[in-house]
Amino acid sequence: MEQLKKVLITGGNKGIGLAVVKRFIELDYDVVVVARDFSNFEFKDNKKVRCIEYDLSNMTGLKDLAKEVGEIDTLINNAGYMQPKYSYDNYPLEAKEHIMNVDLYAPVELMTLFCEDMKKRNYGRIVNTASIAGQIGHPDIWYGIAKAGLMNATKIFAKLLGGHNIVVNCIAPSPVETDMQKDNSEERKAEFKKAVPCGRFAEPQEAAEVIVWLATACPEYVNGTTVDFNNGSYVR
Ligand SMILES: NC(=O)c1ccc[n+]([C@@H]2O[C@H](COP(=O)([O-])OP(=O)(O)OC[C@H]3O[C@@H](n4cnc5c(N)ncnc54)[C@H](OP(=O)(O)O)[C@@H]3O)[C@@H](O)[C@H]2O)c1
């Protein structure tokens, strides 16, 4: 079967996801974007782009969301957030459940739902956006835990789906200049900048280059991997 060239990008309305959307439009993909707010989304009237308003903390609606999206051969699980205002010992249950839904359970469920058509087509590419937080830990402990879980899920999905020519990878960025940085304290940002050899945070386009490469051109022997994206600030 031919490649479909249809991609779902969660959180594609801004930040890293928006940079990914731009690259896929250039590659002439049909692009579906899922997020909660498209009021400032520059591609909302683009013919190649479909916007679906959806809150990914709503786990029970994911099956219907998948039906609405239809068949895709490329999935970019990019949406995510953190809430460092909560400390490990004062983290409301609802806040825990919310972040685990958005940052871990929904991405895993979307892989589960969308891989069925990919299997039939015998082609698929999935890229998950984790974080360095999942490798080194984070003051928002549930953010770090969710991202670590996503890296782990990447490994097992690569094994489960590899026989169907479906390649599943992950990226673990250190800080990137997006709105998300508003949630990080000035102290933590300054500390991080000192640890980055190039002395700056990454631009969203740089992360997008890696994500799009993993989703399009990378050899299938790169599978189940988490690509470190941190300019040597965390060398393993
Ligand atoms: N920036 C960094 O320093 C950094 C570092 C490592 C990893 N990351 C990861 O990179 C990914 C993209 O983040 P970013 O830096 O581009 O931040 P961003 O600009 O704040 O974008 C976050 C995206 O996630 C979407 N999103 C958040 N909650 C959602 C929900 N409940 N339902 C649906 N969509 C939701 C947002 O759209 P709406 O708000 O419109 O829903 C937005 O598109 C995230 O997974 C983040 O954890 C970022």
Image (spheres, rainbow, N blue to C red):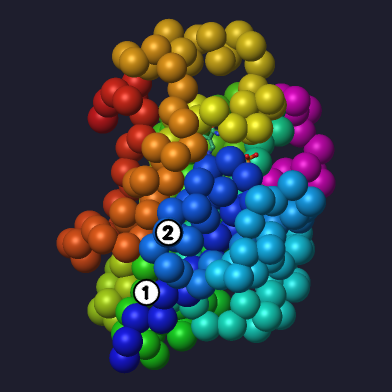
The percent coordinates of residue 134 (x first, y second) are 47, 38
Q: In which of the image's four quarters is ligand 1 placed?
A: top right
Q: Secondary structure at mark 2?
A: helix
Residue neighbourhood size for the residue with mark 1, other residues' Cα within 10 Å, grouped as few (<14), some (14–19), many (≥20)? many
Residue neighbourhood size for the residue with mark 2, other residues' Cα within 10 Å, grouped as few (<14), some (14–19), many (≥20)? few
The magenta span reads: 85-102
Which three-letter amino acid code belongs to the residue tagged 1? Gly
Would you name the residue on which mark 2 appears?
26
* Left or right: where 217 falls relative to 173: left
Q: Secondary structure at mark 1?
A: strand
**Quadrant including the C terminus:** top left
Would you name the residue on which mark 1 appears?
124
Residue at position x 55%, y 60% from top? Answer: 9
Residue 35, image quadrant: bottom right
Which three-letter amino acid code belongs to the residue tagged 2? Glu
State the CA–CA distance, disc 2 to disc 1.
Answer: 20 Å
